[in-house]
Amino acid sequence: MTASLLSLTDITRTFLQGDQRIEVLKSISLDIRAGEFLALLGTSGSGKSTLMHILGLLDRPSAGTFLLNGRDVSEMDDDGLSELRNRTIGFIFQSFYLIPYASALDNVLLPGLYSPTSTAKLRKRAQDLLSLVGLGDRMHFKPSQLSGGQQQRVAIARALINDPDILLADEPTGQLDSATSTEIMTLMADINSQGKTVILVTHDESTAAVAKRKIYMEDGRIGEGG
């Protein structure tokens, strides 16, 4: 049996609100193996966004152990976490976050600014990724010239530019119609079939239907089903 890519043990996350301590995550234990397609489901306030931020190395737990590829990330400083995040995790968000004045190609290249890979190789990879997501003929279009679905495809290509181990998608179809949502989720399933670990955060069961495993969150706790 392969070792877990991501392993969380008794993770809690507490925030201070005035003098009150609010426990948002309550003793979360979860293992995610390389190559999985996992959907993390829950309503607003369930704790799924907080858990996503911890999985994406955007936040630290208040207590518990988090291992990424066997490495305890709690031992790392902010610079180390930043470098690991850029190399290991690709992010896809509901709002796309594309630079409006930059072409699709330049948007995809952006995370590569911190990569040791040569500019020429990165440019070729960005072109190949845009072709992979069906935008080979729109590389030089700006976001305003693209539909919502096309903008999300650019965002997916951007998330893949550094060849991350993990693709973390936060409500990736939240601004898309149902037909386009199906296309985007089919694309993500295709990417997963090529070996990428995909973690999908959503409140929508239909969006999560393509995932191979579903985790449900409620009141900061976790349980499997579906």
Image (spheres, rainbow, N blue to C red):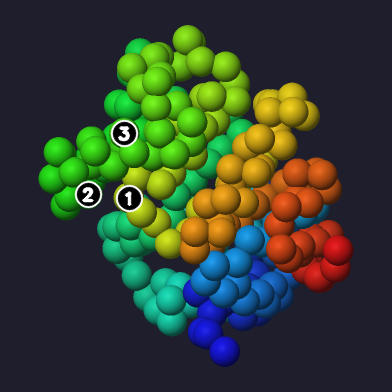
Q: Disc 2 on helix, strand or loop?
A: loop
* Res 168 seen here: no
Q: Nearer the viewer, residue 191 or 4?
A: 191
Q: Which mark is residue 162?
A: 1
Q: Position of residue 191 (x, y in %)?
A: 53, 51
Q: Position of residue 36 (x, y in %)?
A: 60, 67
Badge 3 amino acid: Gln
Q: Residues within 10 Å of mark 2 (few under 14, many from 20)?
A: some
Image disc number at residue 127: 3
137 lies above or below 53: above
- Residue at 51% x, 15% y is 146
Label 1 vs label 3, nearer the camera: 3
Q: Residue drawn at (62%, 76%), measured in percent from left and top?
A: 31
Instruction: Classify mark 1: helix, strand or loop.
Output: loop
Q: Specify which label sits upstream in the sequence, 2 or 3.
A: 2
Marks 1/2 in contact by CB < 8 Å: the verdict is yes
Looking at the image, is mark 2 or mark 3 nearer the viewer? 3
Closer to us: 212 or 24: 212
Kind of residue at disc 2: Ser
* Quarter of the image that includes the N terminus: bottom right
Whole-percent x, y for residue 49 in the image: 66, 50
151 to 64, vertically: above or below: above
The reply, left or right, for residue 69 in relation to residue 223 is: left
Which circle's residue, 1 or 3, is located before the other in the chain? 3
Question: Which residue lies at the image location 40% right of the left edge and 34% below the top edge?
Answer: 131
Q: Amino acid at mark 1?
A: Asn
Residue 77 location, quadrant: bottom left
Q: Which mark is residue 115?
A: 2
Q: Residues within 10 Å of mark 3 (few under 14, many from 20)?
A: many
14 or 166: nearer the viewer: 166
